[in-house]
Amino acid sequence: MSRIPEAFVEEVVSRSDIVEVIGARVPLKKKGKEFAACCPFHQEKTPSFYVTPEKQFYHCFGCGVHGNVVGFLMEYDHLDFPTAIEHLAGRLGLEIPREKGDQEKLDRIGRLRQVTAVATDWFRGNLKRSPEAIDFLKQRGLTGETAARFALGFAPAGNHVEAALGGRATPEELVATGLLIQRDNGDRYDRFRGRVIFPIRDPRGHVIGFGGRVIGAGEPKYLNSPETELFHKGYGVYGLYESRQVDQRPDQLIVVEGYMDVILLAQNGVAHAVATLGTATTAEQLTLLFRQTDRLVFCFDGDDAGRRAAVKALSVALPLMQDGRDLRFAFLPEGEDPDSYIRAHGKTGFDRFVEQEALGFDRFLTLHLDESIAGDDTAARARKNKQAHQLIERMPPGSLRRLTERQVDRHHGLFGKPMREAAESSGPTAAKRPPPSRSEEHIILRLLLAHPRLIERVRPESVWHEGRPPAVIARLLADALHPDDRQAAEAQELAGIENEEIAATMLSDILEKRRRREALEAKKRQLRSGLTGDSSTR
């Protein structure tokens, strides 16, 4: 197997949340800026094992073990280095690069990050020299401290980027980061002109793109960086990095609609507000947010546009609503936005509004159907209940899903077992119906058939114990899959697998558990064999 490029390893380590990875295996408790636990590598009663998010590092003052997230996985899960990297990369939805071109791409991304960092500094310097931009921010109530915290800047009117950054970035790099627009005839001009600039940072603090708000008249009011190698609107979340500087694992995150909402809430004491980047909420964004906290509250305007955005967010979120997660929707009074509300009522009033007025996702679901489907007679309630259950079917199996089904049935006047559960457990053939096959191999095959790009993850010999995939997977890799296997795979009901990242995470988890189980079984066989051999010589 070819060597994993160091740049990729650094990328995986920098993007992995060490608190999340270790916290899934060891119960961590927050102690100031660190997290503490009893060391998992030696016996102790008083916690001396500390995880430092800022440095992405762990250390035990009792036994001396220390390292980064890769080292922890190798030590705790008994993984070799490539397997640990593969596990972390799978959680992030990254493919391990093996070719020279992949290494060149990683190097190029590192270089583009340097360009956006230089541009951020230039924009910030411009803000300090622009009375017009400073007055604009002051009129919105922003302080200099807040502007510095969010690294706000200013892009002057006209074309200045190439001349200002020419010594530190090539024109091609400025185009590749979206700072310059290049016409077909080769002419180049600044994308952001006469705008307040909002640097968009990933969870580790790298500037991946920019948002620009026009000062005075002009369209569009807000302008984002285009899709680039660094910036993908459907994956980024504004304000998450700043939230993590206050607390890596907040009790909840409040999702609002715009940059200024995030900034002004933070200035008024609501530190854990984030915003999607001018797009409908995506599964990738929600997956990222649920890595930080188990509770999300969408805080939208109460108008039709806000309601439509909430319905879309709910639809995307349902496949991610596993046990332990909470999703709520708070709609501001007409004419209010987060900025105006917190100015009028203060942090205490805003917190009270969110706590008291936010609807649980099940309640919002039923209210939405009540508003969109006319009538309250028996037939209308049956239609609403049917549509509700069709949406709930997208949730992963578990207690949350069962409780949601019961709550929806109660809302529509049904009591006892949920409608679907009752139907499946009744009838003359119910007792004779065999349970669906849950073969691990067919579950893996279902994921691979749903997303053929994931097949490359199961090709390496290192994925499988002793390098041998199960027969059904071997037939798939040889392009000789039997129709019976395909039918058995397609019978597997796996909630959320239409999203490739969710499917990739499922696949990584299954493969990891399978490797560990088979390795343990091999050790047991070896031990039994050794014991048998010893007894025969006595």
Image (tube, rainbow, N blue to C red):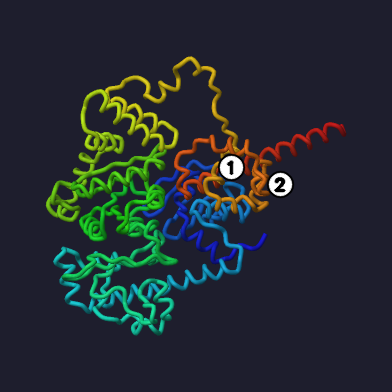
Q: Earlier in the sequence, mark 2 or mark 1?
A: 1
140 shown above or below 74: below
Please give the name of the residue rendered at 39% of the width and 47% of the height, measured from the top-left corner: 290
Q: Of the residues shown, which amino acid type is indicated by label 1?
A: Leu
Q: Is residue 40 visible?
A: no
Q: Which residue is mark 2?
A: 466
Q: Position of residue 332 (x, y in %)?
A: 18, 47
Foreground: disc 2 or disc 1: 1
**Observer-nearest residue: 123 or 25?**
123
Please report the residue visible at 61 percent of the width from the left and 41 percent of the height from the top.
514
Quarter holding the C terminus? top right
Alpha carbon distance from label 2 to label 1: 20 Å
Q: In the rendered structure, which amino acid carries the disc numbered 2?
A: Glu
Residues at circles 2 and 1 in contact by the CB criterion of under 8 Å: no
Q: Secondary structure at mark 2?
A: helix
In the image, is 13 to the left or to the right of 473?
Answer: left
- Where in the figure is residue 480, as x and y percent of width and height? 67, 45
Q: Quadrant of residue 155?
A: bottom left
Residue at point 52%, 50% (across, down): 62
Relative to 514, is 398 above or below?
above
As helix, strand or loop, the secondary structure at mark 1 comes to: helix
- At a point 51% along the width and 57% down the height, the residue shown is 94
Q: What label sits on residue 445 in the rendered view?
A: 1
Q: Position of residue 183 (x, y in %)?
A: 36, 78
Q: Percent x, y for residue 208?
A: 39, 66
In-front residue for pair 216/308: 308
Where is the N terminus found, in terms of image quarters? bottom right
